[in-house]
Image (cartoon, rainbow, N blue to C red):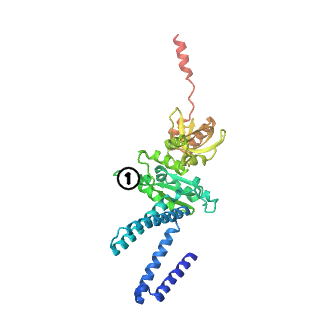
């Protein structure tokens, strides 16, 4: 609110100065119009500039200064060509604007590579070079990075390379509806991440024409910027670690946040389907963890109490192995036989086999 008050006061000051000064000997109406347009342009430029980082601003300033110096040298050469006065002035003005513009854009684009720590921390930012995190295509499409940013566990400057944006656009323009929806989802996720407070999304135009694969380009960019790669791609994770690049794997974070289950504990699960091995049932926890239960094939479609026997941690996730005790089977059988009269097949499942018929043995003996 205070910022808008300052902007309003500044806009009013420009209008007042245009009214009393009247540049170019304009009448009052044209002077007011010119002042209003100039004030709006300055406020719009200010609102855009304040989003830039300190390194970008310093780079743009240095680039524009170098551009002005270069334009001065070129203009001195043009002045010795003995051109017409009007042509010479026009050429010098064009050279000045062109060189200043090129220096400004180039300096702003390369400003993030400046090492401000050499200035003794006077102009240092909170986000140092180690705070850069490069996003790959898979983690953007996945979408969980947006929720992680909102919780504050991921902060600083998130770098999105231009070749990743190009790949997202190609996926969004795909003829396949599934790929097209995934690409559009990725672009929407980037918009959500940009709106998170404390997060700066930086688009980097850096490319590596000699490298064809996007994963290798990400590794090269991360090494150049001393950044970390945020991904959920298992192969990219391994290759990056071999290349000496730090990786933040979303899947590893999700596995670390899953509840810890120790052997011997009892848990309540819903048996969903049959397992691969004999007499096994498969259940899933709320976070998607698979639970394989022995002696639970007959309990498919029911909620049971299982005792954890072991926990297996793999790169793809966590698997829990449990056992449905025999006494629980008998209890479940009695409950089903008394509580569900309309399902006699459930009662027969848990009945113990009858002993052998003794009369058959007597007839066999009499035959001998």
In this view of the protein, which residue sits in the foreground, 363 or 137?
137
Q: Is residue 199 above or below residue 217?
A: below
To which quarter of the image does residue 86 belong? bottom left
Residue 73 image offset from top left, x and y in percent = 44, 65
Residue 208 image offset from top left, x and y in percent = 43, 48
In this view of the protein, which residue sits in the foreground, 342 or 83?
83
Q: Determine the residue positioned at 53% across, 38% down.
A: 281
To which quarter of the image does residue 119 belong? bottom right
- Left or right side of 341 for 85: left
Local packing at callout 1 (Cα closer than 10 Å; few below 14, some 14-19, many 20+) is some
As helix, strand or loop, the secondary structure at mark 1 comes to helix
Question: Is residue 191 visible in the rendered structure shown here?
Answer: no
To which quarter of the image does residue 365 belong? top right
Which residue is label 1 attached to?
A: 170
In this view of the protein, which residue sits in the foreground, 316 or 119?
119
Which quadrant: the N terminus?
A: bottom right
Residue 74 image offset from top left, x and y in percent = 41, 65
């Amino acid at each position: 609110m205070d910022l808008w008050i300052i902007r309003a006061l500044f806009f009013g000051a420009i209008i007042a100065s245009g009214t009393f000064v009247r540049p170019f000997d304009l009448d009052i109406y044209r002077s007011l119009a010119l002042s209003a347009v100039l004030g709006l342009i300055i406020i719009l430029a200010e609102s855009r500039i304040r989003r830039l980082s300190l390194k970008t601003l310093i780079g743009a300033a240095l680039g524009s200064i170098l551009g002005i110096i270069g334009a001065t040298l070129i203009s001195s050469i043009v002045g010795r060509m003995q051109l017409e006065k009007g042509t010479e002035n026009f050429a010098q003005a064009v050279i000045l604007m062109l060189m200043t513009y090129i220096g400004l854009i180039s300096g702003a684009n390369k400003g993030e590579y400046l090492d401000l720590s050499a200035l003794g921390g006077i102009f240092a930012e909170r986000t140092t070079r180690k705070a850069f995190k490069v996003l790959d295509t898979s983690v953007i499409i996945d979408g969980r990075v947006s929720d992680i940013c909102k919780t504050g566990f991921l902060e600083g400057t998130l770098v999105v390379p231009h070749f990743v944006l190009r790949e997202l656009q190609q996926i969004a323009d795909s003829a396949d509806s599934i790929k097209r929806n995934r690409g559009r989802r990725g672009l929407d996720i980037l918009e959500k991440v940009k709106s998170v407070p404390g997060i700066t999304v930086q688009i980097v135009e850096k490319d590596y024409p000699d490298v064809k694969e996007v994963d290798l380009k990400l590794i090269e960019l991360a090494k150049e910027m001393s950044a970390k790669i945020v991904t959920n791609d298992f192969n990219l994770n391994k290759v990056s670690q071999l290349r000496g690049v730090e990786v933040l794997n979303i899947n590893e974070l999700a596995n670390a946040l899953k509840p810890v289950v120790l052997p011997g504990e009892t848990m309540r699960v819903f048996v969903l389907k049959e397992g691969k091995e004999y007499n096994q049932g498969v259940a899933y926890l709320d976070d998607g963890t698979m639970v394989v239960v022995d002696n639970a094939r007959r309990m498919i479609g029911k909620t049971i109490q299982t005792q954890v026997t072991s926990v297996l941690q793999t790169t793809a996730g966590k698997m829990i192995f449990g056992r449905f005790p025999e006494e629980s089977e008998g209890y479940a059988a009695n409950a089903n036989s008394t509580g569900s009269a309309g399902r006699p097949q459930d009662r027969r499942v848990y009945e113990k086999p009858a002993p052998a018929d003794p009369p058959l043995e007597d007839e066999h003996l009499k035959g001998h």
